[in-house]
Amino acid sequence: MDQPLIIGFISDLMFATRIEQAASLQGFRLRWIEGVETIDPQALPQPDRQQKISFQQAGEALSGTQVHLMEILTREHPALLIFDLGNTQVPWRTWLPLLKSDPATRRVPVVCYGAHVDKTSLVHAQRSGADAVLARSKFAASLPEILAKYVRIPDNTALEAACQVQLSPLAVRGLEEFNRGEYFKAHETLEEAWNADDSAARELYRAILQVAVAYLQIERGNYPGAIKMFWRLRQWIDPLPAVCRGVNVEQLRQDADRVYTALKSAGAEGISNFDRGLFKPVIFHLMESRGDVSRAVEG
């Protein structure tokens, strides 16, 4: 099992070492993003031109370096983000409200720390949606407790167990609609199946319905909408095992990623001619028990 990942937007390497020591003791991995050039080599730090955006505006603010940021965070699935509010090489005033409002990243816990005299930054981080905002001294003194409290650790055991259960009839109907290319219907049906399930594996249905929405956005020519759906999808599909409830999740992951890669290559100007032959059906099997006999039905 992979160790939970903490991403720190921190340029003070001496302080970063203290965080790394505390994280290592609890079995966490660290990645440092010291400045915008860490994720986008073509970007130049512009600390004096940080744009303060509101929580409501954040969803419309995807461009340039922010796209690189979203790629990293949705691919790597951090269990915690830490922002040093004194790091002038990171435009946290722009990034933080974006990350805490976008459906692809808003579930990721965020802890911020800064100088206790910098009230403006501390308040702004809090209003931008950070889960915890602390003075630097308090953060340093309470590192083990803070990591234990805020690092999000998934329950993979519960997920594996829930994946052994049969697909619900609603889910089967949704998969059949998906495989007929009826993506809007599939979304509606699978959302109903998701709402009716209270187990850890319900996210299987959410993952598939979001693939359906991404494909639907491509059909409608909505390039940014499709890109954002693929980002949002990853948090639900990536934690799933290769097979869940008879669904070949690994194949679906590969198919969806292939479409995403082709979409990025085509760009907004090429979406009208996108090759929809890349939209592959979901492969699944139903096990119907009849006495001592089990029959596999391939969807």
Image (tube, rainbow, N blue to C red):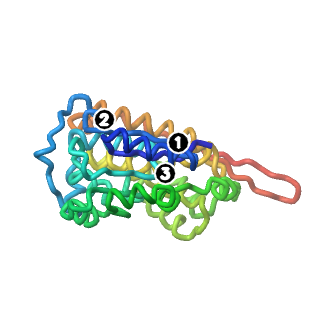
Screen quadrant of the N terminus? top right
Q: Amino acid at mark 1?
A: Leu
Q: Earlier in the sequence, mark 2 or mark 1?
A: 2
Q: Is residue 272 shown above or below 235?
A: above
Q: Residue at x 58, y 46 (%)?
A: 27
Residue 153 image offset from top left, x and y in percent: 55, 55
The tag on residue 252 is 1
Q: Are marks 3 and 1 in contact (CB under 8 Å)?
A: no
Q: Earlier in the sequence, mark 3 or mark 1?
A: 3
- Please give the residue where the numbered disc 2 appears in the rendered image: 39
- 4 left or right of 75 in image: right
Q: Amino acid at mark 3?
A: Phe
> Circle 2 sits in a helix, a strand or a loop, which is it?
helix
- Looking at the image, which is closer to me, 65 or 111? 111
Q: Is residue 125 visible?
A: yes
- 134 left or right of 157 in image: left
Give the quarter of the image for residue 261: top left
Residue 113 image offset from top left, x and y in percent: 32, 56
- Label 3 environment density (alpha carbons within 10 Å; few <14, some 14–19, many ≥20): many
- Please give the residue where the numbered disc 3 appears in the rendered image: 178
Image depth: mark 3 or mark 2 in front: 2
How far separated are the C-alphas under marks 3 and 2?
Answer: 36 Å
> Circle 3 sits in a helix, a strand or a loop, which is it?
helix
Q: Amino acid at mark 2?
A: Ile
Q: Is residue 155 shown above or below 279?
A: below
- Label 2 environment density (alpha carbons within 10 Å; few <14, some 14–19, many ≥20): some
